[in-house]
Each structure stands twice: as C-alpha cells, then as structure tokens.
Amino acid sequence: MKTKTSTFNFKKLIFPLLLLLLVFNLFSCAEQLDQSETSSNASEEIGDVFDSKIDLTGKKIGYCSPSLNAPYYQALWQSIKSTTEKNGMQFLSADGQDDINKQIAAVEDLITKGVDALLLNPKDPDALVGVTKIAKAAGIPVFIIDSSISPEAEFVTTIQSNNLANGELAGEWLAKKFGNKPMNIALLSGNAGNPVGRTRKQGLLQGITEEQLRTQGKINLNVKTQAYTEWSYAGGLKAMEDILVAHPDVNVVITESDVCVLGAIKAIAQAGKTDDILIVAGADGQKEAIKYIMETDFYGCTAMNSPVQIGKNAVQFAVEYMNGKTDFDKKSYTAPLLITKENAAKYYNPKAIF
C-alpha cells in the first residue's frame, strides 16, 4: 500500500515537470527562431555582401561627405557605413560641414590615415581636384559618388543616379499631363554651377520639349523664373515666397530635387494655391515627397535617386578594385525610375532616413 502511494505521488509530480519542460523548450525554440529572423532581416537592411578573392578584413574604406546636414547625406553615409562593415572592413568618415576648405582638410586627413579606397562626394567640382591627385600619389583609388568632379581629377569612376534620364522622365510626364494647356513655370534649383543640378535641369527641360514636339509638333516652354534654394527647406520656402509675389501666374514648379521644393509647399499652401500649382521633381524620391504624391494632387511626380543603392554600389566597386578590376566606365548609373501616384506606395517607407 505504501509502495502504490509512493508510485502515484511520483507520477503526479513528474508529469507536470515534463510538461513544463516541454513548454519551456517550445518557447525557447520560438524565441531563438524569432531572434534569428530578426537578425536576418536586420542584416538584409544594412547592405550586401560581395564576392572577394582577397581577405577584406582590416581594409579601410574612407568616405567624405560635403555635409551631413540633410536626410539624403545621412542616408548615404549610413548605407556606405553599413555595407562596408558588413563586408568585414573598417569605415572611416569625414564631414565637409558645407565648407570647401573643411572638406579638403577632411579628405587629406583620410588620406593620411591610409584608407584603401576613398569615396568622395565633392561639394565643388573643381576645388577637390587637388586632393584626388594627392590620393593617387599615395596609391589610393578615388570613387566619386552622388555628385560630379572635373575631368582633370584622378578618379576611378563616378557613381550616381541617372540624372539626365530621370529628369527626362519627369519632364515628359509633365508635358503629357498639361497637353496643350499653357505652362507658366518656376524653376527651383539647388545652387549655381552645381553639375548634378544642371544635368537634372537639362533632363527636365529636354523631357518637356521632346514630348511636346512628339505630340504637338511645337515647343511651348515658358520658364518665368529660376531661383536657388541651396538644397534646403528654408531656401525653398524663401524662394517660393518671392516667386509668388513676382510671378502670381505661375502654375507649374519644376525642381532639381525634392528638398528644393518641400519647403516651398508651405509658401504655396499659405498663398492658397495648392489647387493652382503642380509640382514636378527631377529627383530624389524623398519619403516626404512620395507621401505628398500619394495623398495630394499638387505633387505630381519625382524620380528615384536612392542614397542606399548608390552607397552599396560605391562599396561594391571599391571591393572590385581591390580584387584587381581596372576597366571601370568613368560614369556608373543606377537605373532611372519615375515615381507617380500609380506606383508611389511601392517605394514609400515611413521608417527610412530619407
């Protein structure tokens, strides 16, 4: 009798323990799976791993931005950093702080630190020529990203979005939208002499005129004014306020970049003209612009200039160079892409830096 009682009590004790152990293991496995998936998803977000015949451990990628005082520059910086580190290399960065002399000094500092590749986003196409030659003398390949530099510079290739093709897509869309209706255009530019802005502007105007010639057999291009915004919200706001006073009949705003016009929207809204003015951007696909495209009718379209993709491409080319590739084209482009209300949701990411 005592033996049966003892056996019964043992079973009553061990079964709950086994059940608890089983549940614990199930939760533990689920947690590990969840952590694995989270880790995998995070790693996918921060960059690609590239094939390399050489060991990249310890290699240094140096990057100098003209400024970090804009979401685009921050997103580009993050993309280069993440992709560099995901490939086992060391990331060294420098900020030009919107000052030519500071950017020159920052690049010289990266050269002194012995980087294995220098990624340079020049504030000015001519002022940074000298440091590219210093880099070459030190055996450091230079990759120009996002912007452009004088052909006299020593560099392997330029990596940027296809600014001409993107501008053409946006200009063509605008011409189709207006048809025979007259356009009174205000042009919001970045800053005077900027080669990227100039190419985007060329694409926009070319897209408009080519579409008009194709469909109407004539050109009706009336650009009332051009204003510079210094690639800033505040600059766009001030420029648009002045334009609306001097040219109240403006019904189209075309711009070289989303950032040039995002501030201008406030001035347009304050003037009660969101129903009277259509905005078209030749670049960048900034998340605020995409949101406007999805939710309003006054922001017509923008074109993709992905800082994430440009950053990945730049690091990939640096890795390819370290592996012995030398036959790079002088210009390398990401694919042109127009963002309109029809496809905007596909490219909108509210959590993106840019």
Image (cartoon, rainbow, N blue to C red):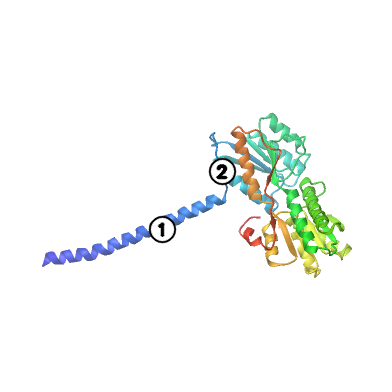
Residue beneath label 2, please? 85
> Looking at the picture, how far across and down is residue 344, in whole percent?
66, 61
Lateral position of residue 130 relative to residue 247, left or right: left
Distance of mark 1 from mark 2, alpha carbons?
Answer: 29 Å
The kind of residue tagged 1 is: Ala
Q: Quadrant of residue 224?
A: bottom right
> Looking at the picture, how far across and down is residue 209, in whole percent?
82, 54
Helix, strand or loop at disc 1? helix
> Looking at the picture, how far across and down is residue 280, in whole percent?
76, 59
Helix, strand or loop at disc 2? helix
Tell me if mark 1 has few (under 14), some (14-19) or many (20+) residues whose alpha carbon lies within 10 angstroms of its own: few
Q: Which residue is at the far right?
A: 246
Q: Quadrant of residue 62?
A: top right
Tell me if residue 280 comes above or below residue 60 in the rendering.
Answer: below
> Looking at the picture, how far across and down is residue 225, in whole percent?
87, 57
Q: Is residue 92 visible?
A: no
Q: Quadrant of residue 208?
A: bottom right
The kind of residue tagged 2 is: Glu
Q: Is residue 165 visible?
A: yes
Residue beneath label 1, please? 30
Lateral position of residue 41 relative to residue 105, left or right: left
Tell me if mark 2 has few (under 14), some (14-19) or many (20+) residues whose alpha carbon lies within 10 angstroms of its own: some
